[in-house]
Amino acid sequence: MIPLTSKKNKCKKHKKTRLKKSKCTKCQQKCLKKCKKKSLRSYHIIQIPVPKPAGISSLPKYIYFRISNSFTDKQEQRIKDAIGAVLLQWYKHSNEKWAGGTNTGTSELALCIKPYATKNLKSKWNKSPLPNAIAATNLVMNQFTQLIRDNGFGKSPPAIIDPQSSTTIYAPVGKTKRRIPLSFQINPKQLDNSELTNLKLTGSMFHAWLHRAGWRDPKTTSYFISECPMCVARNLKPKKPGVRDSSFYKFFD
């Protein structure tokens, strides 16, 4: 029988005593708790005001994120601005669709997307096909409303913003339809890159939200998940001859 003080089973804190395994387990649990507290100290909370579009009630005052302390003040501000700009697109779309109470309007964003987006219009949650990009845009914004409510009212897990060293903004496709954390990873070097304009950063953030809302890649021409944030990155303007789509969606992950 192997003694409990052998190297295999020895608890470092109690090297000189013969301990039961349960005490060593308690030490491990204490270490895990300390590590968790230490990791939480590596973040601070930011809050982004939620605008109030017409026709949508029961909205939180803010949405919240735990952001890594490793970002500089300038980088953090760019992240805040990009999230706020996504909320502004949602706000504008909702107001324009509300159309004075009819709820039958078509937003400028939807009109921008319609000529270009023809593939993968529906999210992973939709079983029925959608007729066009306008219907897909309406669906997206309804899902964004759910993400905002779940975050702001604490119904989803905390949203974490971490740095990453590749691509621009990475966010996996949401695993469930509701209570999805708005977590993402963003490249600090890209935030300092002058080629990543504010509009392109907003488009990249919008693309990340689409993933969290259930839309899948590929990120290429004619696919909704590309054309939608590309419209945002173009400030809802038509495409220009000679400007490649890849100059936008290279910032989408």
Image (cartoon, rainbow, N blue to C red):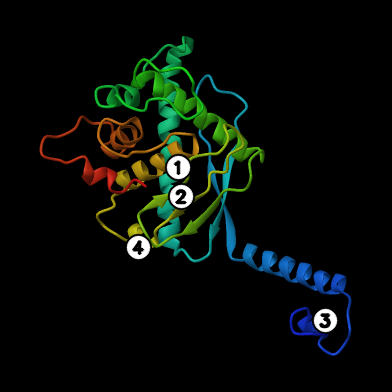
The first of marks 4 and 3 along the sequence is 3
> SS at mark 3?
loop
Q: Residue at x 30, y 45 (%)?
A: 200
Tag 4 and tag 3, C-beta contact below 8 Å: no
Tag 1 and tag 2, C-beta contact below 8 Å: yes
Residues 57 and 26: in front is 26
Label 3 amino acid? Ile
Q: Which residue is mark 1?
A: 84
Q: Position of residue 98 (x, y in %)?
A: 46, 16
| Number of numbered callouts drawn | 4
Disc 4 and disc 3: Cα gap in Å? Answer: 52 Å
User: Does the rendering let one see residue 52?
Assistant: no
Quadrant housing the N terminus: bottom right
> SS at mark 4?
helix
Q: Is residue 63 left or right of residue 135?
A: right
Q: Residues within 10 Å of mark 3 (few under 14, many from 20)?
A: few
Disc 4 and disc 1: Cα gap in Å? Answer: 21 Å
Query: Any mark on residue 2, and which?
Result: 3
Q: Is residue 104 left or right of residue 11?
A: left
Residues 54 and 36: in front is 36
Q: Residue at x 37, y 47 (%)?
A: 253
Q: Which residue is mark 4?
A: 189
Query: Any mark on residue 80, and which?
Result: 2
Quarter location, residue 4: bottom right
- Closer mark to the observer between disc 4 and disc 1: 4
Q: Position of residue 227 (x, y in %)?
A: 30, 33
Q: Residues within 10 Å of mark 1 (few under 14, many from 20)?
A: some
The first of marks 4 and 1 along the sequence is 1
The first of marks 3 and 2 along the sequence is 3
Disc 3 and disc 2: Cα gap in Å? Answer: 57 Å
